Every structure is written in structure tokens, then in C-alpha cells.
Image (tube, rainbow, N blue to C red):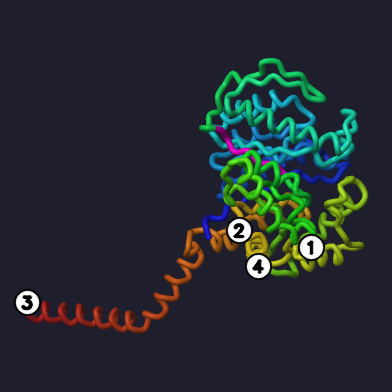
Amino acid sequence: MDRLRFGTFLAPFHPAGENPTLALQRDLELVEHLDRLGYDEAWIGEHHSAGTEIIASPEIFIAAAAERTKHIKLGTGVTSIAYHNPLWVAERMVLLDHLTRGRAMLGCGPGSLPTDSMMLGLNPTDTRELLEVDLDIIMRLLRGETVTQKTRTHDLVNARLHLRPYTQPRFEVAVAAVASPTGPRMAGRHGIGLLSIGATLTKEGFDALAHHWNVVQERAEHFGQTVSRRDWRLVGLMHVAETREQAYADVQHGIETWFRYFQKTAAFPQMAVEGGDAKEMIDFINEAGIGAIGTVEDARAQVQRLWDQSGGFGCMLLLGHEWANPQATKRSWELIAQHVVPHFQGGEVSHAQQTLDAKEYAMGKREDYAAQQMQAVATMTERYEQEKAGG
């Protein structure tokens, strides 16, 4: 397979009632940690209510994270563009593109929390309709067009960007998808990336993965666009440790809080999760096929299942969730980087397989080569004795 990229989709999820300042610092430290480990991408969410997903501006967070990191690409995951003037969305992202020297990416969505859009007098139908309109305006602006258009929420008059993007012809743009074909349809129409969020977090979404890409391709062909599976990102669930028992113990720290948020707080039925106690929650993740709580072998198997089910994609994003304490969470990311990622990178022969093949080759030759080494030592020793005897 092509080099599969890895990264995080950081909403983030923090227990309501704890110190938000420290929680945000943990988020920044996690992105630094991932950068050091060689992860490719981090996507940062936008939310304004419910007290759990506490980053209100992914752009501001990205600006801070960019100064702490060197390589990792940073995306808005996602900017709820129905809440904003599309001109300013495009302007802010062009600015980030310059500030990060091309490491910024724009992820677009309608907004997942109805308690966010309610404060703007919008319902979930409104935000989805506005997403389509506003995304079209943003793409036109990024192409260098001048836009005059009145939408339900804004009136643009000869609107244009006063800077061109640092990245030519533009930075990466992706649209979010949960379970419906709305996101894939827009991705195909504009020839942009797809962020499959709920598609890997529910059984129904998992089953719909291959269909999602079929929609992208069909719409791209209809509108004369070119799309690539490399621009398709799947968001999944994982926590790993040295043993399965340790992983299960780790997630006792916070998995129930995470489940209860989706069960009782977030009005987001596409993310319905099942489980009455921690054991049932772990079983739901593992048995529904939507995630992996266990060992690196379990994680590798899950990535392979997603690859096979989807037909191939470009990036595996692991949802940031704080099921475990910060130390165990960082260790999980380390184990995945060390023992999972190399199996999905390197081309036709993965980095992991290349070193395993080299080891196997050396083991097969060891007996013969060891004998030759011993013979070489004996030969050189004999020559030395002859030199001494000859004076």
C-alpha cells in the first residue's frame, strides 16, 4: 500500500468541571508529543457549548501549536463554517497557511452540537444548507475569484482575498462526513478531501465506508473533478498498552465519562454509543469493530480491517479521548508510533517487513557466517605465529 499517514482528531474531550486552562495545555503538549513521534497530522475541533469539547477557535489553537512543533500538519477539525462569514474563514486560513509555512489545513463541517447553533438562531437543517453554500464561496475565493453573493447570514459585495495562499495553488481542504452522503457529495463536487468521522465510530458508519468513496467518485466525475484516496481520512478509536489487561485497566480512568457525554449530553445521535459499565463499554468498542482497546497487535488488525472495508484511504486519525490518564495516553501514542505505524508505511514492502526480512536473512546465514568468522580468526592467528617464528 502507499504510505499511510497517521494523526489525531482532537475535539477535544475533557471532563466538565476540571481546570480548562490545564486541559488546554495538555492538548498542546499532546500535539508536541505527536510531532516528536513523527505523526503526520493533527485536526482540532470547534465547539461552543456543553463544557466538554472546549476549543472555541481551532485557528487560534493551531497558531499556538505551530510555534511548538516542527513537522506535523495542523488542520481545523472542523471549522463550523455555517457559524462564520465565509470570507473571514478563507482569510484566517490563508493567514495560518503563511504563519505555518504550509502546515495548515481547512476542515469544514456544519457543526455537530445543536446547542452551538441554537445560540445563533440556527437549527441542524440550517447549518447543513449553509455548509454547502459557504463551502462553495470559500472555494471560489481560494481560486482567486471575486464574489458578490447574499446568503441567509451574510452579504458579500465584491469580496476577495488580499493575500494568496502560501501553499500553491491552495492548502488542503476537506469536508466532514458522519454517516450520510452529504459530505462525500461535496468532497466530490469540489475535488477536496473527505474526513470520515462517524463512519468509523459506529457499526452503521463502518458498513457504509466503501459507499462513501463511491459517492465521492461519482460526484467528482459528474463535476469534472479529480479526487484521490490519499485525501480520505478516517477517524477511529484506540488505546493500547503492553498487555490487553493493562489497556483495559488504563481506560477505567475516563472511558465512562466519554461514553456518558455521548449518551446523555451531546445531542448527536449519529454518535450513539452503547454500554452500561466500563466492561460493556470496552466490549462495545472492540466487538462492534469500530475501535481497538488492547495491544499493538489489536491496533494493527483494526487498521487493516478499516483498510479492507474501505478499499483504501490516505490517513488514519485517532480520536483524542482521554480514556486513560496523561501518562498512559502518551504511552499509547508511543506504542502505536513504534509498533503499528511501520507496518503501514514504506511502500510495497513496509518498514516493519523490511527489517524483519533483514533479520530473517541474517538468522538464516548465521551458522555459515559464524563458522567463516571463526576460520578467519584462526587464519589470522596462524599468520601471526608464523611472523613471530620468522623473526
Report helix, strand or loop for mark 4: helix
Q: CA distance from mark 4 to mark 1?
A: 14 Å
Going by the numbered disc 4, the residue's amino acid type is: Ala
Which of the 4 image quarters holds residue 87? top right
Residue most extreme to the top: 157
Label 2 sits on a secondary structure element that is loop
First-in-chain label (2 vs 1):
1
Q: Which residues are magenta?
A: 170-176
Q: Amino acid at mark 3?
A: Gly
Q: Is residue 51 left or right of residue 307?
A: right
Dot 4 surroundings within 10 Å: few (below 14), some, or many (20 or more)? some
Query: Which numbered dot is residue 301?
Result: 4
| Residue at position x 6%, y 77% in the image | 391
- What residue is at 68 percent from the left and 38 percent from the top? 76
- Badge number at residue 312: 2
Q: Is residue 54 left or right of residue 194?
A: right
| Disc on res. 248 | none
Sequence order check, earlier mark of 3 and 4? 4
Residue nearest the viewer, comparing 300 with 105: 105
Which comes before the other along the chain, label 2 or label 3?
2
Mark 1 is on which residue type? Ile
How far is the residue under mark 2 from the one under mark 3? 72 Å
Amino acid under label 2? Gly
CB-based contact (under 8 Å), mark 2 and mark 1:
no
- Of badges 4 and 2, nearer the viewer stands 2
Q: Which residue is mark 3?
A: 391
Upstream in sequence: badge 4 or badge 2: 4
Residue tagged by mark 1? 285
The answer to whether 284 is drawn above or below residue 58 in the figure is below
